[in-house]
Image (cartoon, helix red, strand yellow):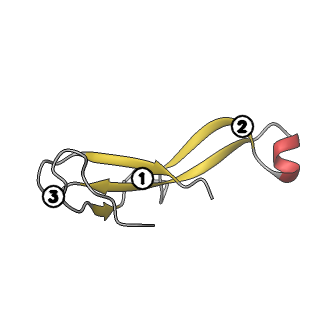
């Protein structure tokens, strides 16, 4: 992913990792869209990975869904 710049400070943001519940290694965004393939026909919803970025100056955190 391209480097993100803070809209408030204009400095480069640092990529990080969100820490979710203890039994999940990553945080995901669940959408109302059906997942692809057989799982989608069974009613399973799409889950997108989340990329997180934080500004080292002002602390702004931005989350971006990996929309492949």
Identify the residue under disc 1. Answer: 22
The residue closer to the viewer here, 29 or 42, is 29
Q: Quarter of the image holding residue 29?
A: top right
Describe residue 26's horizontal placement relative to residue 10 as left or right: right
Residue 12 marker = none
Describe residue 35's horizontal placement relative to residue 51 as left or right: right
Q: Closer to the camera: disc 1 or disc 3?
A: 3
- The answer to which of marks 2 and 3 sits earlier in the sequence is 2
- The answer to which of marks 1 and 3 sits earlier in the sequence is 1
Q: Residue at x 19, y 44 (%)?
A: 8
The residue closer to the viewer here, 40 or 6, is 6
Q: CB under 8 Å between callouts 1 and 2?
A: no
Identify the residue under disc 3. Answer: 56
Label 2 to label 3: alpha-carbon separation: 34 Å
Label 1 to label 3: alpha-carbon separation: 26 Å
Residue 37: image location, x then y, percent: 86, 52
Q: Residue at x 47, y 60 (%)?
A: 25
Residue 33 marker = 2
Describe residue 54's horizontal placement relative to residue 35 as left or right: left
Q: Closer to the camera: disc 1 or disc 2?
A: 2
Residue 9: image location, x then y, percent: 15, 50
Where disc 2 sits, the SS reads strand
Where disc 1 sits, the SS reads loop
């Amino acid at each position: 992913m391209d480097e993100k710049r803070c809209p408030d400070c204009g400095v480069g943001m640092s990529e990080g990792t969100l820490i979710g519940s203890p039994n999940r290694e990553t945080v995901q965004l669940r959408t109302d869209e059906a997942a692809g393939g057989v799982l989608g026909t069974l009613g399973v919803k799409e889950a997108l990975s989340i990329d997180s970025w934080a500004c080292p100056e002002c602390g702004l955190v931005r989350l971006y869904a990996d929309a492949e």
